[in-house]
Structures are given as structure tokens and as C-alpha cells.
Amino acid sequence: MSNSPTKIELTQPDDWHLHIRDGEVMKDVLADTARQFARAIIMPNLKPPVTTVDLAKAYQSRIESNLKLLGVTEFMPLMTLYLTDNTSADEVRKAKDAGIAAFKLYPAGATTNSDAGVSDLKHCHAALEAMQAVGMPLLVHGEVTHADIDIFDREAVFIDTILEPLRKKLPELKIVFEHITTKQAAHYVRDAVTGGKNTIAATITPQHLLMNRNAIFAGGIRPHNYCLPVLKREEHRVALLQAATSGNSRFFLGTDSAPHAKGAKEAACGCAGCYSAFNALGLYAEAFESVGKLDKLEGFASFFGPDFYSLPRNSKKITLVKHAQSIPMELPLGDATIVPLRAGETIAWSLV
Ligand code: OTD
Ligand code: ZN
Ligand code: ZN
């Protein structure tokens, strides 16, 4: 493939990190994702969180009802459970038997609806050992939450104080370091010694590939560019883009598209989360094209995720064209609206 094409065909991608919420807004956000992706890892940070197999099955059937309403027949939600201080080894085994794709670790207080998260990993030892034993991946929100740690340092501190000790203790546990935002995380995942086993990977969002922290403050406060982990300095964005486009199978696509209604973002204490689902693939294509690496997009978007999760790659193909798409100022979200990433601007690539 030439590195400046105007059209690219890809195996259909999956989104390995997605928030679709619940209730009346779910249908609107699910439609955007199902247009582009074959499968998605569905995050469990509902209110209350999805902590048991039974809750996940009930959530899955609400997702399936919405897919039916949308007339979507080929989208597969991959369900996850929210790890708590009380998750038992039995629940882990039950989850494995029920086809749950992964458990999610939120350090308590790290992001939206994470109050029920883990206060100290020592409470989870039996559950984590069971995950390692049955081959259940652990997805981590990799930030410490102590108020005395600078918000821009929380990911790097997490690596040293939580992630590395955890990997030492449970070297065969499959871990996905979610939505990485720093060069420390990119290098940690790249350089981790795994003895040839698929035990560590990372997802990367479009916003962290395309923007640095200046985007939160460009000419005034920009709540729609505020997400957690927060955007970092340019040197970090460059390291993430390098990792994503390197062809290293430890890095794959996870949008972390996290919808909040316009009013909840444009507020004195605005919610964290970027809504990238509207044209997520166009955003990733732009990022890869910016470094002449469109030829590396298919591995990142369509191959490395299923390979890590031991799922089959998709067989359907999709086509992206270099045809600028205008992004609306607002989209419907239940009876409110949502402001998508790049609202009022264009994205260079779009899905045919
Ligand atoms: N980050 N917002 C949300 C989740 C993510 O950490 C995350 O995965 C959310 O709203 O659920 C956000 O900024
Ligand atoms: Zn997170
Ligand atoms: Zn997320």
C-alpha cells in the first residue's frame, strides 16, 4: 500500500474500550459504534456498576434490545465486570464460564462512576489469582488517585507502585493497560518482558493520538476535550503515536468514547469524557496518516485486539475514503444532545 492513498480497505475493526451507558441514551451512542465496528468491549461503570455475571447478562440483553430497535444484526457486545474489593474467585470462574470477556480495575475515584472501585489491590488477591488461572484478562484504568499526586503524574506513578508489583506477583495474568496517555506507559508496555506470552497490551484513544493538553485550554476552557486520564504534553502524544503506528501487536484500538450530555460537560464541574464514536475510524486514520503510517492501521484497528483476546479476526471488509466529513455541533442523546469530538470541524477520512 502506498503511504498517501485516498482510499483504504480494512478488515472490519473492533473497539476494545467503549462506554455506551444505559437507558434511553444507549441507542443513540450504540448506533454510531455499530456503524463502524463489529465488536466492542463494553465498560461496566454504570450506576450502580456491573459487578456480577447476572448484572452483565441483564445489561447485555438491554444492549441486544437496542440493537434490535436499530435494526443492527451483526454487532457483538463483549461484556466486562467491574472489579471491587469484594469480587470473589467464584465470580471470576462463573464469569469465565458465562463468556464474560474481562474484568475492569478502577482504582476508587479514578474516573466517572468509579467510587465502588478497588481501594487496595490486596483485597482482590483471590480474584486476581483466579483470573490468572482461567485466562481472564484484567483491564486497568492505570492511574493512582491520591490527592497529593499531581494529575499529570498519576499514570506514571501507577506503573511503578501498582502495575509493576502486580505483574511481578502474577506474571501470567493477562493485562490491558487501558487508554494509555504517557510515554512512560507506551515504553513500559513495549519493553515488558513476557517470555513470549501475550500477557500485556494497551489500548490508545483517538484523542490522545491527536491532541495534547493545550487542547483543553485553547483560547478558553474546552470541556469537550477533557477526559481522564487527562491529555498530556506533546512529547507524550508523539510517543503514543509512535507506539500505535509501530506495528507492535501490544498496541490496539480502544476509543474510550465516553458520552455525557452537553449540559453535563459545559458546567462548573464538567464531566470527564470525549465522545469520539461518531467517526472514530476517521480520527484514527487522520492520526496514522499524519506520520505516513496508514499501512499500519489495519493491524492496530483490526488484528491485534482479537489476537490478544484469543478471538477470531473479523472477515468483513470496510472502506475508508479521504473525503472530509463535517462533524455536527450537536447530536441527539436521548432527550438531550451531545457534542462530539471535533464538533463544527471536519475529519479528513470517512467510512464509505
Ligand atoms: N474516562 N470518562 C469516562 C470513562 C473514561 O477512564 C475512562 O475509562 C466515563 O465518562 O465513563 C473518562 O474521561
Ligand atoms: Zn479509565
Ligand atoms: Zn473508559
Image (cartoon, helix red, strand yellow):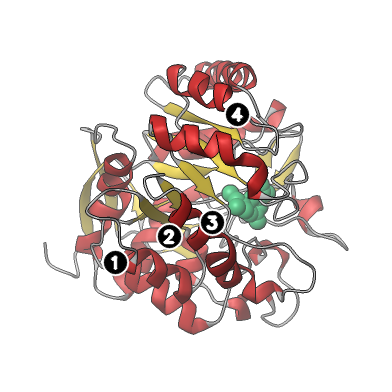
**Closer to us: mark 2 or mark 3?**
2
Crowding around mark 2 (Cα neighbors within 10 Å: few <14, some 14 to 19, many 20+) is many
Query: How many angstroms separate mark 1 from mark 4 (CA)?
Result: 32 Å
Please state if 52 lies on the left or on the right of 178 as rendered. Answer: right
Check whether the beta carbons of the residues at disc 2 and disc 1 lie within 8 A of each other.
no
Residue type at mark 3 is Ile
- Give coordinates of residue 163: x percent, y percent: 52, 59
Crowding around mark 4 (Cα neighbors within 10 Å: few <14, some 14 to 19, many 20+) is many
Provide the secondary structure element on which disc 3 rests: loop
Residue type at mark 2 is Leu
Going from N to C along the chain, the mark reached first, 2 or 1, is 1
- Residue at 50% from the left image edge and 46% from the top image edge: 139
Query: How many angstroms separate mark 2 from mark 1 (CA)?
Result: 14 Å
Q: Which residue is mark 2?
A: 283
Q: Which mark is residue 27?
A: 4
Provide the secondary structure element on which disc 4 rests: helix
**Closer to us: mark 1 or mark 4?**
1
Residue type at mark 4 is Lys
Check whether the beta carbons of the residues at disc 4 and disc 3 lie within 8 A of each other.
no
- Give coordinates of residue 309: x percent, y percent: 34, 38
Query: How many angstroms separate mark 2 from mark 4 (CA)?
Result: 22 Å
- Give coordinates of residue 22: x percent, y percent: 68, 29
Query: How many angstroms separate mark 2 from mark 3 (CA)?
Result: 11 Å
Identify which residue, 289 or 244, lies in the foreground: 244
Residue 339 visible, this orientation: no
- Give coordinates of residue 269: x percent, y percent: 85, 61
Q: Which mark is residue 245?
A: 1
Check whether the beta carbons of the residues at disc 3 and disc 1 lie within 8 A of each other.
no
Q: Which residue is mark 3?
A: 327
